Image (cartoon, grey):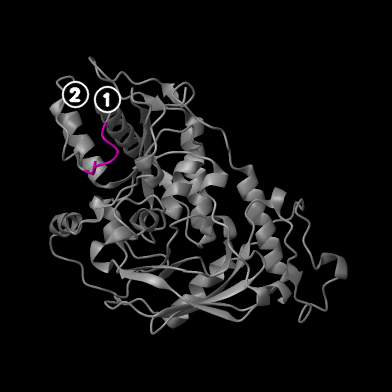
Amino acid sequence: MLLRKFSITAAATILLIPFTSQFASAATFTAQEVNEVHNFQKEYASLDKTSYNAKNIYAKKPNLSKKFNAGSLSSKYLKTQTDYINYYRSLFGLPAVSTTSTLNQNAQTTAAVMAALNANPFINQHGLPSEARPSYVSKSIWRLARDTSETSNLNFNVSNQSAGDVITDLITDHYNLTGSDTGHRAWVLSSRLTTTGLGAAYGKNGYRYSVQKVLNTNDIFRTANQPVVAYPSVRLFPIELLQGENIMWSLYLSNRTVKNKPIITITDLDTNIVTTATHVKNYSSCGYGNFKTILTYSPATTNLVAGHEYEVNIKGVQKYRFKLFKQDGSNDTTNYQVQTQNITSTPTNQATTDLNSKTDVQSPILLQNKILRAVIVPKATALPNNQNTFFNALLKKGWQQNFFVRQYALSNPITTDE
């Protein structure tokens, strides 16, 4: 779960645009879609981008030796991280989640314990299987840290990330040590998640140990608020969340089980170029995010262009379309061509939406739910007689074996930011 910042130019992959696409016209957007893009851009711009380190992250600094005390995070850090979680969930039409003081305290205690241990970021720390309890950490705190780390997304880094960068890493899930399962993403985007807890603490080794509590017993048996969560999402999606190495795409089904590995194609509807996905994997037995089906795949050589529309065909399972937009509105030069048909009653000067408009329109992305429910109707399933048994069985499925590490750091010396 080591996350290390390095030069963007060193990490960037240059995508060559096929010759035919240079002459392709961009997709057309409805006036509502353009307005929604601008609303997403405004919401993203409003998110706090403050970088944090050991000097400004705490409301109360932890004591990580004798008289152990977990300390507490600043309210601004906690609010910002929650805001990022809910911003990303809104891209998928998922309802907002909230933190609780108890879950935050448990996550903070867990982060502080790992920081006190200077826990090795290159090995599995879910459940602290390779660590020994220090004498200054009580048995009850140790038990809490083991249980919480077992049921949380964990993220370790040595850079001055913002509160939101941690969540972005979880959503893109491209520093995943165990492969392409996108389990961290599935938990952040769980269709059953209602509450979460957040914690972070710095060890003497310079690592920030971040904890997000995601597996809650009550959520396991909750009715899913959405049958399908696709990444990229249906209709509109930020191109920034698809750019970079090792970003797998995914499809999660809340109530339907798919056991095979389907053939998947991606079509750029503006160039008619069809790409067959590679590295298709089925992680449904792992139970990430309390989903019944977890499919992940690589878009292979798919050329991604803001303003283009794409169709994903997961054969025999799901077919959907999405249009790409730039999340960073300050750097958006995309020409979002607006459809002219069926909007003749709209004045010409309202066909495109002013980015600074004060008018907020209800997001049509929630229509995704209705569209998908028309295709996949969730069926009620009987609950197990013993919920604790089911909960423990879920843990044994192995989802907790999944955690982050920035592969780049494996071949580069580690430095501590001051």
Q: Position of residue 151 (x, y in %)?
A: 26, 47
User: Residue at 37% of width from left, 46% of height from top?
Assistant: 407
Q: CA distance from mark 2 to mark 1?
A: 9 Å
Q: Position of residue 124 (x, y in %)?
A: 23, 44
- Residue linked to disc 2: 137
Q: Quadrant of the N terminus?
A: top left
Frontmost residue, 387 versus 287: 287
User: Residue at 44% of width from left, 48% of height from top?
Assistant: 169
Residue furthest out toward the bottom: 316
Residue furthest out toward the top: 66
Where is 180 relative to 200, above or below?
below
Residue 142: tell me if it is visible: yes
Label disc, if present, on residue 116 of the rendered structure: 1
Check disc 1: other Cα within 10 Å, few if <14, some if 14-19, many if 20+.
many
**Labelled pair 2, 1 in contact (Cβ < 8 Å):** yes
Please report the bounds of the magenta region as a residue range: 119-126
Label disc, if present, on residue 133 of the rendered structure: none
Frontmost residue, 50 versus 279: 279
Q: Is residue 151 left or right of residue 305?
A: left
Query: What secondary structure prevails in the magenta region?
Result: loop
User: Residue at 29% of width from left, 35% of height from top?
Assistant: 106
Task: Say what amino acid the circle numbered 1 marks.
Answer: Ala
Location of residue 58 by image quarter: top left
Q: Is residue 130 left or right of residue 295?
A: left
> Is 139 contained in the magenta span?
no
- SS at circle 2: loop
